[in-house]
Image (spheres, rainbow, N blue to C red):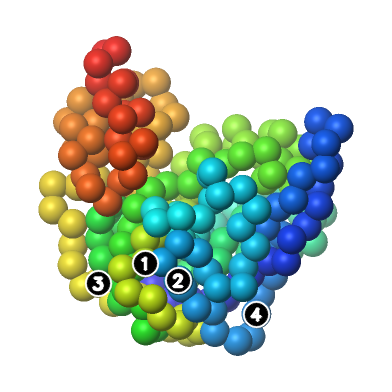
């Protein structure tokens, strides 16, 4: 996996249900390195810390390989890297191969794969349609959040080196399916519930599925 673009945002005000809301989803490429801190990317806008930023969502990665799919669906949008609100646009990022808990060295930072992305209304505002939310969920290649184990700088063309593969885990794509699709695999639910790379709130949500099943 290779970093194609580093992206950050300034605060942007959007309208939602008659209210003004500040968002950091309008990220644009930067030619300078970005610095990953423990709970966010330095100088990047994180407007709502209830759902963005923090230990388990310090930095968001999205795959360059998915851009072509979305550009065909939305050819009239003004496209640039950072379109999905990602801090890092990464070539050959494959959610079906990334395990929750995998640890990678990239640039001078050490990061851990934590969870798939769950789209919110801000993505719909940016794309100009609510349809993007359902499409994003059904397509299933959502990118991934990472936890910053060691702070550091990342620049374009830096590559990801696997430091430690998580054991008895599940991929970010399989986690996404557990969260959004009706049929839940009990074995995968148990793997997720016992995975400390996932935040406890997410693990409790998955535990409820197991109990209800």
Q: Could you give the CA–CA distance between mark 4 and mark 2, rounded to whole angstroms? A: 17 Å
Q: Could you give the CA–CA distance between mark 2 and mark 1, rounded to whole angstroms? A: 7 Å
Q: Are marks 2 and 1 in contact (CB under 8 Å)?
A: yes
Identify whether 157 is placed above or below 140.
below
Give the label, 3 or 4, closer to the camera.
Answer: 4
Could you say which disc has been placed on residue 148 in the image? 1
Q: Mark 3 highlights which residue? A: 162
Q: Are marks 4 and 1 in contact (CB under 8 Å)?
A: no
Identify whether 53 is placed above or below 163.
above
Towards the viewer: 174 or 58: 58
Q: Are marks 3 and 1 in contact (CB under 8 Å)?
A: no
Q: Mark 4 highlights which residue? A: 30
Q: Could you give the CA–CA distance between mark 3 and mark 4, rounded to whole angstroms? A: 25 Å
Query: Along the polypeptide, which appears first: circle 4 or circle 2?
Result: 4
Query: Along the polypeptide, which appears first: circle 3 or circle 1?
Result: 1
Residue farthest to the top, as pictured: 212
Identify whether 60 is placed above or below 174.
below
Identify whether 176 is placed above or below 45.
above
Query: Along the polypeptide, which appears first: circle 4 or circle 1?
Result: 4
- The picture quadrant where one finds residue 5 is bottom right
Q: Residues within 10 Å of mark 2 (few under 14, many from 20)?
A: many
- The picture quadrant where one finds residue 31 is bottom right
What residue is rendered at 29% in x and 13% in y? 212
Query: Along the polypeptide, which appears first: circle 2 or circle 1?
Result: 2
Q: How many numbered markers are drawn?
A: 4
Q: Mark 2 highlights which residue? A: 37
Towards the viewer: 94 or 45: 45
Give the label, 4 or 1, closer to the camera.
Answer: 1
């Amino acid at each position: 996996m290779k970093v194609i673009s580093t992206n950050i945002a300034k605060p942007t005000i959007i309208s939602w249900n008659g209210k003004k809301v500040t968002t950091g989803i309008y990220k644009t490429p930067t030619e300078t390195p970005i610095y990953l801190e423990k709970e966010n990317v330095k100088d990047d806008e994180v407007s709502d810390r209830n759902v963005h930023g923090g230990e388990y969502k310090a930095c968001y990665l999205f795959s360059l390989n998915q851009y072509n799919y979305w550009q065909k669906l939305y050819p009239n949008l003004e496209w640039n890297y950072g379109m999905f609100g990602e801090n890092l646009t990464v070539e050959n990022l494959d959610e079906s191969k990334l395990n929750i808990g995998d640890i990678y060295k990239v640039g001078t930072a050490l990061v851990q794969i934590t969870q798939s992305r769950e789209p919110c209304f801000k993505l719909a505002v940016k794309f100009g349609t609510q349809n993007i939310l359902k499409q994003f969920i059904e397509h299933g290649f959502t990118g991934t959040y990472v936890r910053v184990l060691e702070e550091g700088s990342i620049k374009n063309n830096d590559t990801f080196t696997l430091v430690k593969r998580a054991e008895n885990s599940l991929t970010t794509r399989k986690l996404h399916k557990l969260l959004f699709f009706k049929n839940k695999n009990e074995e995968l639910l148990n793997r997720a519930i016992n995975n400390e790379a996932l935040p406890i709130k997410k693990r409790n949500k998955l535990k409820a599925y197991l109990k209800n099943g």
